[in-house]
Amino acid sequence: MNDDATTDATTHPSPEPASRLDPVPGEWRRVSSKYIVVDFVTTLIWSVMFTVISTLPAWLFGWGAWWWALPIVFGAIMLVTLILTPRRVRSIGYRLRDDDLLFRRGIMFQRFVAVPFGRMQLVDITRGPLARAVGLAELKLVTAAAATGVVIPGLPLEEAEELRDHLVALAETRRAGL
Amino acid sequence: MTQLADGEWHRLHPATPLLKGGIAFIAILGVIIANLRERILEVFVPGLECPEEFCSEDPVSIILDRYLLIGLLVAAGVLLLIIGLFWLSWRMHTFRVTDEIVEVRSGVVFRSHRKARLDRVQGINISRPLFARIFGAAKLELSAAGSDANMDLSYLTSANADGLRAELLRRASGIRAREAGEQAQASTEAAADGGETARVGLSEVARQRLAEFTAPELDPNLAPPQSVVTMKASRLIGSTLLSSTMIFFLIVIAVLVVVMTTTDAGSWVFFALIPTVFGFGSYLVNRVVKSLRYSIAATPDGVRVGFGLLSTTNETLPPGRIHAVQITQELLWRPADWWMVQVNLASHSAAAQGAAGQQKTTILPVGSRADVLKVLELVLPGLVTDETRLLIEAGLAKGRGGDGFTNSPKRAAVLRWFSWRRNGFLLHPDAVILRKGAIWRSLSVVPTARTQSVAAHQGPLERLLRVAHVRVHTVAGPVTAEIGAIDVADASALFRDTAAAGVVAIRSDRSHRWGDR
């Protein structure tokens, strides 16, 4: 848990306060700062792969020198994405309210989701190899709607399990039909 | 009480193998006859002999000449085996209905045993394919949430299927059933009696078949006839001709005709076109024919929607099983003021279809504004009152201020070129109502008791325009309840209020046991 993260998007005084979406102002519970490493390495692997593949037209097919622009543009985008990783991870937050769970993520493309406890069908914990190496897990909430798509990454394993048990218990008390 | 729901294991209609394999059997017979027609001709016209070099190589004649006995034995064996397998599969296919659950066991080699809780039933569909209908049989399908979660009871006798449906719905509805038990018992017994008397005589059987064949899909005791939307043939044909599919098809034809006249590939294109034209023609005819006997009505156990002229299906959706409703209008339907109503359902079945080429989620293929309101009254009971009627009327009309909707700001015209005046939302305590589109008008209604979750999004361009979009998540279906280009403050309010209203509605929602008061 990284509660002392102060440079968060919501408390930042932005020049035009009304333009940024912030439906539920307040403090968010942040994910572990170790997740920055996991996210960085994952993004790095994908970036290198994409950039290498995008060079193929230039040297393999010999379509001309202009095709080198493709990997350059790709590389630049990937570089910016990599640099923004800490900021992106800090934008991930969640909050337990009385009757629902709030989740947020994204800086450029912001997304806020509210999932009522009574609507949770199952709570999943998954751990990739990288996350396992630093002792993290991700928590996935599944409702009857596929679009809900709430995945809270970068939770320390104990916290994830605790949260899962808590959510399952809450869902049980507030159980409803579909 | 129908004797099929007494908690014991029951088998299906004994003619099931024949009805299931009926079409296939006829097809195989057809293939055999087509292949042997020369030989059959030979039997009837002895003078006709085929040339020696063909007949000597014909495997059938080899068998006939040398291995007649073995051939006959093999054929009889195969036939017996097939009949035996069908009989075994019928014997192993049993079902049981108790107060809480329905169980179906089936399969000979790979056994399957499926159990479903009655209060989780999403809908009951009774379909009568033409072949089965002639023999007075019907297929009952019980759908649960999720894909391929249906229980198929094919086939039952028509009267049994109706009785079983009434009984299943009665038990699923909860305690009210026990109070009204005697009443339903009497009516289902009457239906069962109807099944008994069918054995009296052949003429009586024929008369009853005819009565079943021509009877309306709705039991007059259960459905008040005044709420049924009547489907006019002229409207059905007109709406099909003016649909965007039709326009698209005409454009394709026009392009091809131009290609044909200007290039020398003309004849090829022409021949490629013929099957397409036939296919499309049959699609149109099918659509019209299937929807001709469309009916919708309220029963105490939910909405009942019927389709079909020759093969009929009719689906009962208990209260609270409809997750979202969308009313849309094709561009060319506007002068006639026709609308279509689609819904999101938790169960997904590829087999149970409404009108041809349309999913069963199309609950009203085409109807006037008055029809739409009647249908809404049925699918969203409690929501359509005199005051909300005005709001819904406003939702279907052109957008203007003061009609209760919170619309997009003028700066959002960059994102919604024509529709920014109409693009808006309205939060009623019981439902989120979203109004979209200026050219293709639509109105989506999501009951707050059925929302799964809610999300607010904002991208860079939207941030620049100080707008955001909100999406209400429901089960998958044709309706996507999403509204974009809404002022940030309005979107935030919609997000907060929808989340809060959802929580309140979940707490008070009792529709999974709709009779339980």
Image (spheres, coloured by chain):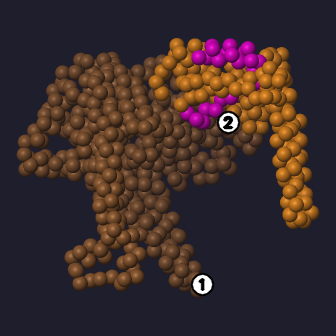
The answer to whether B482 appears left or right of B230 in the picture is right
Q: According to the rendering, which colour does chain A have? A: orange
Does residue A156 show up magenta in the picture? yes
The prevailing secondary structure element of the residues shown in magenta is: helix
Seen from this angle, which residue lies furthest right? A65
Q: Quadrant of residue B233?
A: bottom left
Q: Residue at position x 24%, y 41% from top?
A: B14
Kindly identify which numbered label has been placed on residue B263: 1
Does residue B293 show up magenta in the picture? no
Q: Nearer the viewer, residue A68 or B14?
A: B14
Q: Residue B346 appears at what percent x and percent y?
A: 47, 35
Q: Is residue B6 visible?
A: yes
Q: Is residue B466 visible?
A: no
Q: Residue at position x 22%, y 21% from top?
A: B181
Q: Residue B297 appears at what percent x and percent y?
A: 29, 39
Q: Give the Cα separation between the discs numbered 2 and 1.
A: 51 Å
Looking at the picture, which amino acid does disc 1 mark? Thr
Looking at the picture, which amino acid does disc 2 mark? His
The chain coloured brown in the image? B
Q: Give the answer, above or below, for where B121 lies relative to B352.
A: above
Which quarter shows the N terminus of chain B?
Answer: top left
Q: Select label 2 or label 1 by which is in front.
A: 1
Q: Residues within 10 Å of mark 2 (few under 14, many from 20)?
A: many
Which quarter shows the C terminus of chain B?
Answer: top left
Q: Residue B347 appears at what percent x and percent y?
A: 45, 37
Q: Give the answer, above or below, for where B238 lies relative to B475.
A: below
Kindly identify which numbered label has been placed on residue A174: none
Over which residues does the magenta segment extend?
A: A145-168
The residue under label 2 is: B457
